[in-house]
Structures are given as C-alpha cells and as structure tokens.
Image (cartoon, helix red, strand yellow):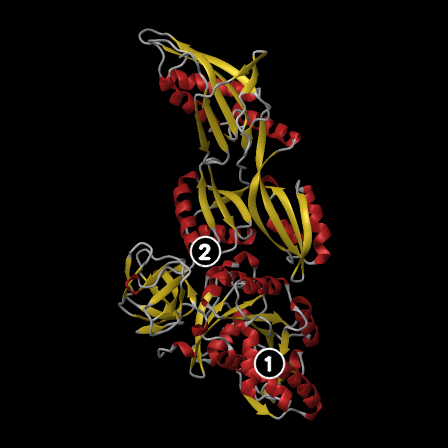
Amino acid sequence: MKNYSTKSIRNVVLLGSTRSGKTTLSEAMLFEGKVIERRGTVEAGNTVSDNSEIEQINKKSIYSTPLYTEFLDHKINIVDTPGSDDFAGGAVSAFKVCETGVMIVNAQQGVEVGTEIYERYAHEYNVPLIFGVNQLDGEKANWEGTIESIREAFGKNKPVIIQFPVAVGDGFWGFIDVLKMKYYHFKDENGTREDLEIPAEYMDQAQELQQALIEKAAEYDDSLMEKFFDQGSLDEDEIRAGLGIGIRQGDAYPIFCLSAKRDIGVKRLMEFMTKVAASPSEREGVTKTGTKVACDENAATSLFIYKTQVEPHLGEVAYFKVMSGVVKEGQDLENPENGDKERLTAIYAVAGKKKEKMPQLSAGDIGCTVKLRAAKTDVTLSEGAKVDAFEEIVFPAPKFRCAVKASVQADEEKMSAALLKIAAEDPTVIVEYHKELKQTILQGQGEQQINIVKWRLKNENKVDMEIYAPKISYRETITKTATAEYRHKKQSGGAGQFGEVHLLICPYEEGVEAPRNFKIDGKDTVLNIKTSETFDLEWGGKLEFYNCVVGGAIDARFMPAILKGINDKMNEGPLTGSFARDIRVYVYDGKMHPVDSNEISFILAARNAFKEAFRNAGPKIMEPIYNIEVLTPADYMGACMSDLQNRRALIEGMGTDRGFSTLKARVPLAELYKYSTTLSSLTSGAATFTMEFADYQPVPADVQDKLLKAYQESEEDE
C-alpha cells in the first residue's frame, strides 16, 4: 500500500446499535477497496473486525477495531465500534482520532436505544454524522418508518435524504440517488451495479427530494444561497460544498440506502466520504497547555496513542494517530511529559489482525506500532518534544461497581495482574485495591462489561473470579458535645506507664468559629486555647485539635502523642470501624508522672478518652451520597422515579434534554449496586445515566441500627 498524503485520508468511526450491521458494512468496505478478496459474516465468525474469540462466541462487537480500505485514490481509516453502551469506551477513543461518524440504523427496527445513545456521544465529542439506513433487504424493512423515527429522535430538519429505495425487503436491489439523479440497480451481492436513468414513476419524488437537498445545501453558505435565489438551482459540486458545511456544524444528517450484506450502496457511501467528509487537516489537535496543533505533514512529527491491546505473537500493540508531520520506521520520538524516548522499530497500517508494514505514515493517518517500552493510551510522542502532550481522552465515568476476589486464594496475585492488564487495554475498566474496605473493587460501564472481564480471566488467564456487592465507605461523626477522661497506669517492675487525659469533643462545622464556652462537670467553663491545629483528613472532613491545658498539668511535649492517639481512633471509628471525621477536640486537663509518663502512655490515654467521649456525643454514621442523572424516554419516567424512591433517593428535578426526559436525584451509594442492570431492565435498555460523588450525609436511624448490629455480629464472629 502506498503512503497517502493528509488530504487523501478520511477517518470514520462506525456507530449504531447492536445488530445494526456495522461489522458487515466494514467487511463490504474492505472488499470494495480490495483489502480482502472475500467477505466474511458475523454468523460464520470470520469477519476482519470481530476477530476475538469472545466476539465470535457472542456474535457481536465487544472491542473497537481499527481497519482501513482504499477507494478513489483515498485511504479510509475505519474504526468499527460495539453497539452496547457497556462498551462505549471504544467509540469514545475513536472520536479522538476520527473526523466523521457513520451512524448505521437498522431499517427493520428504526432508531434504537444505541442509535440515540451514540448520537449523544457524537454530539458531546463534536463528531459530525452521516447516516446509513441498513438492512433494507430485511423481511421487516420499513423505509418510511425508519426515516420518521430519525426525524422524531433527532429533529425534523436535520435528516437530508440523499437516496431512497425503489423497493424494500427481498426486492431491494436498487435506489434513486437524488444528488447524482441516477437510479443504481445492483445485479448481484458483490456490488456489481448498473447506473441507469430514473424510472418515470419515481421522477416526481426524486425531483422533490433533490429540490429539498439543494435548499438545505444553500442554507449554510451565503454565496450558495444567493446563487440559489438567482438561478433556482445548484450544481452537484455546490450541493456537496454546502452540505459539507452543514454536516461539519452538526446541522445536517445526510441519509444513504444500504444493504451491507448484499454490498448495495457501499461504494456510493464511500465516494461521498472521499468527496464530502472532513479531511484530518480540518481538525486541529489541542494540547494540555491549550496550544492548537495543525494536522500538517510538513510540521514537526507528533503522534497520539488512543488505544493499546495485547495480541498473541505480537505482545502489546499501540494504536496511534499521526497528529502532525510524518512518522517513519526507525524514528526516535520523545514523551514530552517525562522525556522518555521511544524508537518506532516498525509501523503498520491496520485491518484487524492484518498488519501491513509501512515505511512512513503522514499527518492524519492511523496506524500501530509494537514493542514500545512505556507508551500507553493517552500518551503523546513527538520529535524532540517539540509538540506538547495532547489532551487526554475523556472516558465516561463508571456506572457499575463491584467487589471481586479469586475463587482460589492462591490466585489473588495472578487475578490482580490480569485485571490491571485488561484495565490498561480498556480505560473504562477501573481496578483498585481499596485499603479502607480491604477489597479489590472493579468498576466499569455495566454488568455486561464486567462479565466479559470475568470471561477473559477464566479463558485467557485460567483464573476463576467471584463478583459480589462491595462494602460501603461509611464515615462516623458526632452531633453533640461530650467530655471524657482516662487514666492509663501500668506498674510491673522497672519503669512504669502513666498518663491521664481529660478532653472535650464537639462537632466541626464549616465556617463556624470554634466555641470556647462549655459546661463541664455541671459548671460553666471557658477554655483558653493555647495552640490549635487543623487537619484536612485524607478520607474527607476535618479534625481540629486544641491544647487548652493550663498550669503545666501535661507537658507540651506529650501533645503530639495525644494527637496520635486521637488520630489512631479516628482511623477506626468506635461505631463500625469506619473513619471518623468533622470533630473538634479540646484537651483541657490531665496528669503526668515525673518518671513514668511517656509517649505510649498518653497515646493510650487519648485513644480511650476519645472513644468514650465519642460514644456519648450523639454518634452518627454517615454514608456516601451520589448525584444521579437519568436520561430516559418519557414513557419510562414513572418507573425510573419509583425505582429511585425505593432506593432512598431524594428527587431534585426533572426536565428534558434533546428528546430525552431527565431525572436528577441524590442517592446513597449503598442503594446503587447493579443499578445499571435494573435501569436497563426497567426501560428495555432505553435509558442511561451518569453518577458522581456528592457528599456524606447521616444515615436514617433504622439503617444505622442495622449497621451497628451487623458490625457487632462481625466482631463477635472474629
């Protein structure tokens, strides 16, 4: 394959619901570009894109797959993506390196959940869309119904019909193209077509749609609008130019007819890509410092790694886009963030497992390399660090959280290593050992994704993994003022131990000055603060520590020991062993011994005094609260709201957002285990949601009683 210049490259991401036909379309595109000699099928498990065992078992895309084809002296790089929202990370990473999205809609189903979800993602990441109505040869194909569903979902003015079929179902062997004003008839299932005149019975419809197309194209350019008013028409190139502006602005969705299975309409779609879709040169890269980098093959060389994957016989493969300059085999590049140097021992054009070695790739092109030492997803490499690191990919936040452990304890280390490798390949999979909970926590986009991770561990790493509900990071605090004193005394030959601490604790309130007037032992007392320290606790909240000791009852040198004792107990709260927070501690009196007092004595005295005071200060368990925003079709709003209320949610608002109903709520994390699965079940997969940590709030009394009882039972078991 020859090296293509930037102006002759097109990068497209295939989007759509599961079973819409993206993989079949990619197969036809590779066939038309003579990258493959024979088209595979999803059913047979022999497509270039779905080439992993798990994809072939499930007969659907699970990973995003980079491909390429050559057509009309252009190289079209294609990223075939999964249709399930659980695997949205593949599409999101593709948005970083592709200038155009091709949204595939199943003519037998119309706009589906995945169509709407991925249209939203494309809008969010500013990727313009071309629509392909696929499976028009299907038994239940409905052209008019599909077009109406697109208009209802995305606005009546956005869809622009470029083609319409002369028949659907088994009789779909051709379509009218109103841009070309031709009737394309296909003679077989290998894309062999005849370019014919439009039959008389379709001419009126074709002319009406062409007029609508011309008017739409004229909307986006003043000079075209002026010519349209003067002459009443535009030529083919002018229509393309005007339509191209509308596509890039996200205001026009051109619609094409397809049967990817029969290779009908694929060539025309690819031709449109080469003539109308954006070139990489039209999209600047943005660095972390805000600098814009032109996609220019004459500039300093830089590349961005958007995906890594471990492949048999190759090891770790880094997939990249050339952001500027020309990347050459054997070239040395540098990570501008840490100065690490990497040599590109070989570079490849990629079509699934097929890797074609290339001497160089120009700005805008997509390829891969192997055997990099430290370069991972989101890493920039540039020539002499002349280009700053590019902005990282913003992946969707996790929606599913679970605890995991190896079925056989001896496999724990092996499981952890395998999970970290999977997380490196897919950044939407997050794995960490939670020291507080003493659990390995696995997070992802949904239960389906987590089950794929479990399958990989079992089949690729020979490790069985158990999945279960994670513990919750509760916090403990107080609601009242309380005092306590504790004397630690030990005498057993030799040096003894002695330390006595009197302390008072009260709730910390943000923005409220520390009080000094208290009632201690029934007497009104003013505590004079000699020294104060404020600590931002690593688990959240505050600790304020005041030395109010007078008359030398306790030497200042023992104050750090008293503070340590208090910190030790705050690390293991008296109620459930959770972290304590938001407490003011006043040490106001005590005693020491000239010989027997030492640090350990005051640590132990402070620990026990704090524990006793805490139990008498209206102790309260606090739980993490998350802000949830649900996007759902209006028909399911009632079911979503009822389910959230059953989860102790506080509903904060409702609204609409681009055709979806929105529901905002605050929900305890303890109630959100497997929420993504429940939401999908309630709405037939039509709803999605985001979640973000908000704050900690006290648990209801009945919940606190259950937690205290459970902790007491666990303590007794131990």
Q: Residues within 10 Å of mark 1 (few under 14, many from 20)?
A: many
Q: Residue 36, image x and y in percent? A: 44, 77
Mark 1–mark 2 distance (CA, rounded to whole Å): 40 Å
Q: Quadrant of residue 500?
A: top left
**Residue 619 position within the rendered picture, expressed as x and y whole percent measured from the top left:** 58, 25
* Secondary structure of residue under mark 1: helix
Q: Position of residue 702 (x, y in %)?
A: 66, 30
Q: Quadrant of the N terminus?
A: bottom left
Whether residue 42 appears in this view of the structure is no
Please name whichever residue, 625 or 314, is drawn nearer the observer in this view of the structure.
Answer: 625
Give the labeled residue for mark 2.
426
Q: Residue at x 70, y 76 (%)?
A: 144
Which label sits in the foreground, 1 or 2?
A: 1
Badge 2 amino acid: Asp
Label 2: few (<14), some (14–19) or many (≥20) C-alpha neighbours in 10 Å:
many
Q: Is residue 697 visible?
A: yes
Quarter of image, res 246: bottom right
Q: Which mark is residue 612?
A: none
Q: Is residue 206 shown left or right of residue 571? A: right
Q: Secondary structure at mark 2?
A: loop
The kind of residue tagged 1 is Ala
176 over 121 or under it: above or below:
below
User: Which of pointers 1 and 2 lies earlier in the amino acid sequence?
Assistant: 1
Which residue carries the number 1 mark?
217
- What is the x, y in percent for residue 715? 52, 25
Q: Is 513 rendered above or below residue 133?
A: above
Describe residue 608's horizontal placement relative to residue 203 as left or right: left
Determine contact: label 1, label 2, CB under 8 Å.
no
Q: Tell how many labels.
A: 2
**Which of 27/78 is in front?**
78
